[in-house]
Amino acid sequence: MSFPIWLRRPVNLHGQWSQAKALVKELDLHTVCEEARCPNLGECWSHGNVSFMILGDTCTRRCGFCAVTTGRPSDLDPEEPRRLAEAIERLKLQYAVITSVARDDLADEGSGAFAGCVRAVKQRTPSVKVEVLTPDFHAKRDLIGTVAAAEPDVYNHNIETVRRLSRGIRPQADYDRSLDVLRLVRQIGGDRIKIKSGIMVGLGEEPGEVRQTLEDLRFAGCEILTIGQYLRPTPAHREVVEFVPLERFEEYKLFAEWIGFSFVASGPYVRSSYNAYEAFSQQAVVAKR
C-alpha cells in the first residue's frame, strides 16, 4: 500500500537535533523516538522536544504495532533518574515526557522508577512540566498511586485501539484495564493531574467504534486526546488496513471536543508525545476559561 500524498513530507533535521542526539548518547539514555522509529523524530529533536524511555530498551510485552525490542530486560540502573534530570536541564526543556517499556518482570512493574525520575527532574529543574506515559501496571492501585504521588503534571496511558481489535493488537494488555488505569489516576490524583490517552487509526476500525472509544475515554476521566495514523514499522508488524483521510481526522476531533475533551490533537502524524508541551499549554488555557 503506497503512501497517500498527505503522508509525504521532508525530513526535518536542523536546530537542536544534533545536540539532542549527542546528549542522549553521552548520558546513555534511551528515547522512544528512536526505539519506536517515530516519524516525527527529526522535527521534534530539531526543536529540543525529546521523549525519554526509562527502564531499558527491552520490553516484556509483544504488541503488534510496536517496534521496541521484546525480550529479557536488563537490570535497573539506579543512576538513570540523575542522568535523565541532567539531560532535561542541559537541553533546557520546558516540558519533559517520560515513558518506558513494560516491565512485567519487576515486582512494582517499574512504577518506582517512574516516581524516582519525576522527582529527580522536578528537584533539579522545578519549572519543567513532566508528563508520564506509563504501561498499564495491570491497573494495580498501589502502583499507579506510586507514580501519581510523585506529582507528574500529566498522566498518560494509551488505549491504542478500539475494543474489537484490542486483544489481537495488544495480546498482553486489555481494553477495560486501560480504562481502569485512567479512572484510578482520576481517583488518586483528583484534578491536580491532567489525564491523557491516545488511539491509532488505520488498523481496520470502524468510525462508530472510534467514537465509542472516545466516549469510553472521556467517561473514564480523560481530558487530553491524541489520534494518529498507524504506520507499520517493519514487515513483521501488523499491516496498515487504511490510510485514514484528513477529513475523518477532523471529524474525530470535532466529535471529541463535542463530548468534552479539553484538548484534541488529531492528524496522520500525531503521536502520543508529539507537541506534548503545546497540548498541555492549550489545555491549561482552556481550563482557566
Image (spheres, rainbow, N blue to C red):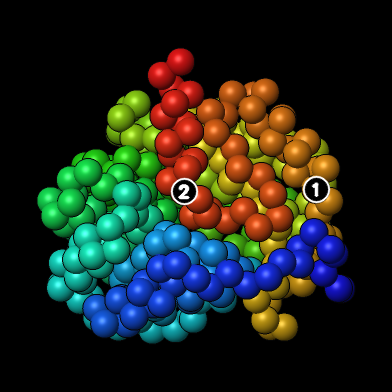
- Seen at 45% across and 67% down, the residue is 15
- Seen at 57% across and 29% down, the residue is 261
- Local secondary structure at mark 2: helix
Closer to the camera in the image, 274 or 260: 274
Q: Position of residue 282 (x, y in %)?
A: 48, 33
Closer to the camera in the image, 285 or 14: 14
Q: Is residue 71 above or below residue 264?
A: below
Tell me if I can see residue 134 in this picture: no
The 10 Å Cα crowd at callout 2, few under 14, some 14 to 19, many 20 or more, is: many
Q: Position of residue 67 (x, y in %)?
A: 56, 76
Query: Which residue lies under the disc numbered 2?
Result: 276
Closer to the camera in the image, 65 or 231: 231
- Seen at 80% across and 59% down, the residue is 6
The 10 Å Cα crowd at callout 1, few under 14, some 14 to 19, many 20 or more, is: few
Identify the image quadrant of the N terminus.
Answer: bottom right
Q: Position of residue 101 (x, y in %)?
A: 41, 69
Instruction: Judge from the rendering whether residue 13 lies leftward or rightward of residue 129; answer left or right.
Output: right
Query: Which residue lies under the disc numbered 1?
Result: 246
Sequence-wise first label, 2 or 1? 1
- Seen at 61% across and 43% down, the residue is 265
Q: Quadrant of residue 90?
A: bottom left
Cα–Cα gap, marks 2 and 1: 21 Å
- Local secondary structure at mark 1: helix
Instruction: Judge from the rendering whether residue 177 lies leftward or rightward of residue 110; answer left or right.
Output: right
Q: Position of residue 266 (x, y in %)?
A: 66, 45
